[in-house]
Amino acid sequence: MARVFIGIGSNIDKEKNIASSVATLRAQFGPLDISNVYETPAFGFEGDDFHNLVVGFDTDQSPQEISQTLKRIESEHHRTHGKESFVSRTLDLDQLLYDDLVLQVDGVSLPHPDVLRYNFMLRPLAELAGDVQHPQEQCTIAELWAAHASDQEMKKVEYEF
């Protein structure tokens, strides 16, 4: 079994889409560890604030199978993919870590490169996987978070899952 961490984000009908995606992931993969949810301003464009969190679970599925499942769930939540990456979205699901695997194939990049760039990925990941070694950085996720200097705003928001 592999330990997998998924980043979840939404800024369109976010409370509904976040809750629904967590329920769908739980139905698909079983018990989930769930981080706090954080509100962050839209990055790279003008838009409503995002809600972001990370979930973790164990699975026998391959990274490619997980990626296909995440795309299906995004589609079920009316996610559209266009040329621009900085746009509002109903749901964004990103595979952040898959055990200690380093992989780049068929649109799957592990570990996800944005983990090192954005508070909204790194902070909730550190809550769930603080003692996990980043496969490329040779330090733990908690150490990465502690060393992460950023002015990206974040505030915790309450959800019931």
Image: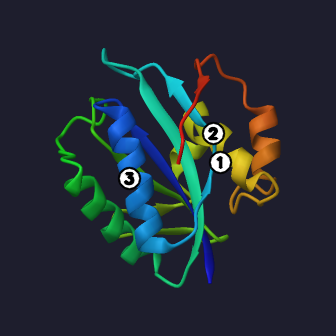
Which residue position is annotated with label 3?
Answer: 21
The residue lying at 17 percent from left, 42 percent from top is 82
Q: How many marks?
A: 3
Viewer can see residue 127: yes
Residue 48 on image: x %, y %: 34, 19
Q: Is the C-beta separation of discs 2 and 1 under 8 Å?
A: no
Residue shown at the point (42%, 28%) measured from the top left: 50
Tell me whether the residue at label 3 lies in contact with that at label 1, contact meaning CB atoms closer than 8 angstroms. no
- Residue 79 at what x, y percent from top left? 22, 46
Residue 95 in the image: above or below residue 11: below
Coordinates of residue 140 in the picture (x, y in percent): 80, 53
**Which residue appears at 80% of the width and 45% of the height?**
142
Q: Which part of the image, by quadrant, shows the N terminus? A: bottom right
SS state under label 1? helix
Identified by mark 3, the residue type is Ser
Identity, as a three-letter code, of the amino acid under mark 1: Leu
The mark closer to the camera, 2 or 1, is 2
Disc with the residue nearer the chain's start (2 vs 1)? 2
> Crowdedness of circle 2 by 10 Å Cα count: few (<14), some, many (20+)?
some
Q: Is mark 3 on a helix, strand or loop?
A: helix
Tell me where residue 71 sits by quadrant.
bottom left
Q: Residue 52 carries which label?
A: none
What's the mark number on residue 36?
2
Q: Image point 46% across, 32% down: which residue?
A: 51
Label 2 or label 3, whichever comes before in sequence order? 3
